[in-house]
Amino acid sequence: MEIKNKKEAGNSFEFELKGSDEVFANTLRRTLISNVPVFAAEKIAIIENNAPMYDEHIAHRIAMIPFTYSDKYNNKDDCECEHGCDKCNVTLTLKKKGKASVYSGDFKSSDRNVVPVCKDILITRLEEDMNFEIEATLITGTLKEHSKFQNSITSTSYETPDNIRFKIKSITGRKPRDMLLESVDILKNKLTQFKKEIAKTKEIK
Ligand SMILES: [Zn+2]
């Protein structure tokens, strides 16, 4: 197996995988897309909103904002706490008065390493005398849980069956190389666990 013609810049990573096969490439691609975690807003408390846009609509927009990543947080299912703590949650606050537009960049985060990837995503517009105040909790999750946890656009194309072009475009500020390596670890752990489970079963001779 060999990696050739690598192109790596910012949020994209491309290479040719030679001497492997579709099954391996596709398993890796699917693991990366579905199992590598990123941050997204989970609980969104709208404290004040007299702008014309409905609370539900605003909550949906906020849930779709991509955030940068820090690996120091636990996944909520693996955390010891019951209802969220500072080991699994990042807190966001936002308070703004009209007349103004409210952007993703207006969020104040409890962790300066976990912030919106783009500062100019419009959330809502406020006219004179309108107030807007929200609090939100960010958690890590994966695409298999919800579409808001999409980490990348990753594709594989086949020039010949053993020459596969891999393209990863991160949409969350996580480095594609890190996500690829994490998907290898996830696969490795699953296989180790599978091997243990098989060993527990009785062989019928
Ligand atoms: Zn926790």
Image (cartoon, rainbow, N blue to C red):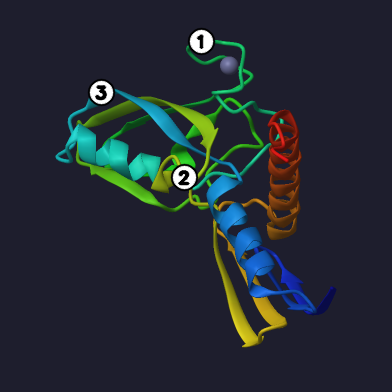
Percent from the top left, x then y, of residue 173? Answer: 62, 52
Q: Is residue 186 above or below residue 49?
A: below
The circle on residue 48 is: 3
Q: Give the quarter of the figure containing the N terminus.
A: bottom right
Q: Quadrant of ligand 1?
A: top right
Question: Mark 1 touching mark 2, by CB under 8 A?
Answer: no
The circle on residue 144 is: 2
Percent from the top left, x then y, of residue 17? Answer: 75, 76
Reading the chain from its start, which is encountered first: label 3 or label 2? 3
Q: Give the quarter of the figure containing the C terminus.
A: top right
Q: Which residue is mark 1?
A: 82
Type of amino acid at the residue the image marks with label 1: Glu
Residue 101 visible in the shown view: no
Which residue does the image show at 25% across and 28% down from the upper left? Answer: 131
Left or right: 100, with 4 as reference point:
left
The residue lying furthest to the front in this view is 205
Q: Is residue 112 above or below residue 160?
A: above
Along the line of sight, which residue is nearer the eye, 29 or 5?
29
Left or right: 161, with 181 as reference point:
left
